[in-house]
Image (cartoon, helix red, strand yellow):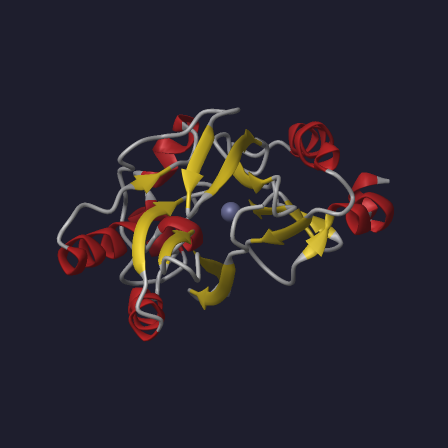
Amino acid sequence: MPTPLSLEIVPVTAFGQNCSILWNPGTRHAVVVDPGGDVPRITAFITEKDLSVDAIWLTHGHLDHAGGADALRRELSTRQGAPVPVIGPDRADDALLSSITRQAALFGLNGLENVTPDRFVKHGEMLEALGHRFEVRHVPGHTPGHVIFHDPESRFAFVGDTLFRGGVGRTDFPYGDHDQLIEAIRRELLPLGDDVTILPGHGPATTIGAERKGNPFLN
Ligand SMILES: [Zn+2]
């Protein structure tokens, strides 16, 4: 078994989005998932724990998930003296990533920035990080290019705004598709296994089993 990883959730932006800092306590290397904003709070935690960040991962292109990614990349790349790549989501969210400042203006939020990832990810690819292997799964519907990051050995997945405790991601956007989201959750999330813990972008962690049995959107 690989070394169990440590996880800290830093709520960011007015939407209280769960930015996650995942690290290997043995090597102190880390990955930051969905730094939507409030970058000083994220970097303060990284400094406090003396972590070296290997990559920034994005589940999708919404402002509260990706609006701090460019600033965090700049800050960490300078501090660490080497480029820290932004990886993901699927290319289908490129238009959203390029319109974060416009999304932010609609909500009256300042300081969020567009971001161009160093590379997009594809369904089925494996990301090697922190001594673990994370599987990328494409779960469209909330946004066209939404992905999740699944660590099968740890029985854990970052699921962004696909499946929540008792809910699913909103789809009342021009590019949203509720039926597609439910279908993708059934195809890509439920088969991960009832014992898999999932951390959504908002609210508490839950398990696949709890949602398969009790989530009103899946019954
Ligand atoms: Zn979202």
Callout count: 0
Q: On screen, 195 above or below 186?
A: below
Residue nearest the observer in this picture, 66 or 9? 9
Identify the residue shown where x is 80% and y is 51%: 210
Q: Nearer the viewer, residue 52 or 94?
A: 52
Tell me if residue 34 comes above or below residue 188 in the rendering: below
Query: Is residue 105 or residue 187 the one in the foreground?
Result: 187
Q: Quadrant of the C terminus?
A: top right
Furthest residue in direction front, as rendered: 1
Is residue 69 visible in this depiction of the protein?
yes
Q: Where is residue 153 drawn, in percent x and y?
A: 61, 42
| Residue in the image at 59% along x and 33% along y | 141
Residue 201: name its quadrant: bottom right
At which x and y percent is residue 23? 43, 58
Q: Is residue 136 above or below residue 112?
A: above
Between 7 and 110, the one nearer to me in the picture: 7
Can the viewer see residue 174? Answer: no
- The structure residue drawn at horizontal position 33% and vertical position 67%, both measured from the top left corner, is 46
Relative horizontal placement of residue 107, taking residue 161 as reference (left or right): left
Horizontal and vertical percent position of residue 72? 26, 56
